[in-house]
Image: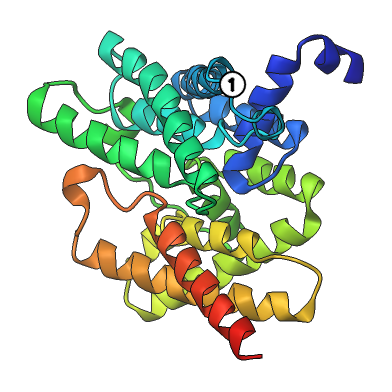
Amino acid sequence: MEEFFKKIPFIDTILKGIGQIMLQENRWTGLLFLVGIFLGSWQGGVAVLLSTAAGTFTAMKLKYNPSEINAGLYGFSAALVGVALSFVFQATLLIWVLIVIGGALAAVIQHFFIVKKIPVFTLPFILITWVCVFVLHHFTQIPPSEMMSAPLETADYDDFLTCTNAFGEVIFQGGILSGIIFFVAVFISSPAAALYGFAGAILGSYISHMNGEPIEKIHMGLFGFNAVLSAIVFSGFKKINGLWVLIAVAVTVGIDDLLVDHNTLGEVGGVLTFPFVAGTWITLLIQKLFKTKK
């Protein structure tokens, strides 16, 4: 397989870009993510391939840093734009065009912040998706996708499935199998990241439950996926990592619950991964202040 990826490095870069959705520079993680997305819908699978390819191709044509391109840093926000638009809207020609354009724009915005050395994580995806959702809802009649319009199914979940569902919801996947595949995908790349992500989902679900959020949505992972990402960012093998994960998850979930309860971002498609970005920024600031005082 190594020879295959050496012959077609573009595919390797695309898979790493998809893997970077959960901060994993690993082609096999990206491939498993792709499998999980296709299990949810073929449109989502095609969309994530198109948008990631668009972002990666744009970065290559604009001659961005090759090591950053090869690490998949110009693919993950692009990938999320693709899967988000295909999840929210019925796959019309305009949506497919926006998936490609959005993927390319995500790479350009990502590059701006990389050059400025500002860790924005998935912010390019958030900004592009918010703009697209707002404009499409107000100026077009494109109907929602089947996944968006389908009634919520209630099911009995145990704690494990609640947490793996949180992994699935990071990439807009509500299926139990997709969530398990995503957890395994992160685990084969970084067991510490996967287990801290799992713990983050448990803590996030508990905090949201204490805040009175709907239990059905908690079980679906809708109040855990931002916590998963925040936990993965601060995961590691030092004892102090556990403290930073605890702080990051608590801050992230607090922001998430607050925004959801007040429907603050309903007009632009919801919170997406903004609580993760905001919670991580705040935790990094606390971390910096802590190191300065030492």
Q: Give the side of residue 191 with respect to residue 219, left or right.
A: right
Q: Amino acid at mark 1?
A: Lys
Which x, y percent locates residue 200? 58, 67
The residue at 55%/30% (across/down) is: 37
Which x, y percent locates residue 61? 55, 15
Q: Nearer the viewer, residue 69 or 122?
A: 69
Q: Is residue 292 above or below residue 277?
A: below
The residue at 48%/22% (across/down) is: 51
Q: How many marks?
A: 1
Tell me if residue 83 can be seen.
no
Q: Is residue 31 above or below residue 98?
A: below
Q: Give the side of residue 22 with respect to residue 92, left or right.
A: right
Q: Quadrant of the C terminus?
A: bottom right
Could you classify mark 1 by the number of other residues whose Cα lies within 10 Å: few (under 14), some (14-19), or many (20 or more)? few
Q: Nearer the viewer, residue 55 or 184?
A: 55
Q: Nearer the viewer, residue 212 or 119?
A: 119
Q: Is residue 277 above or below residue 135?
A: below
Which x, y percent locates residue 161? 59, 56
Tell me if residue 29 can be seen.
yes
Image-quadrant location for residue 8: top right
Q: Give the side of residue 225 with respect to residue 24, left or right.
A: left
Which x, y percent locates residue 90? 29, 21
Image-quadrant location for residue 220: bottom left
Q: Secondary structure at mark 1?
A: loop
The residue at 23%/67% (across/down) is: 261
Q: Which residue is mark 1?
A: 63
Q: Quadrant of the N terminus?
A: top right
The residue at 71%/56% (across/down) is: 194
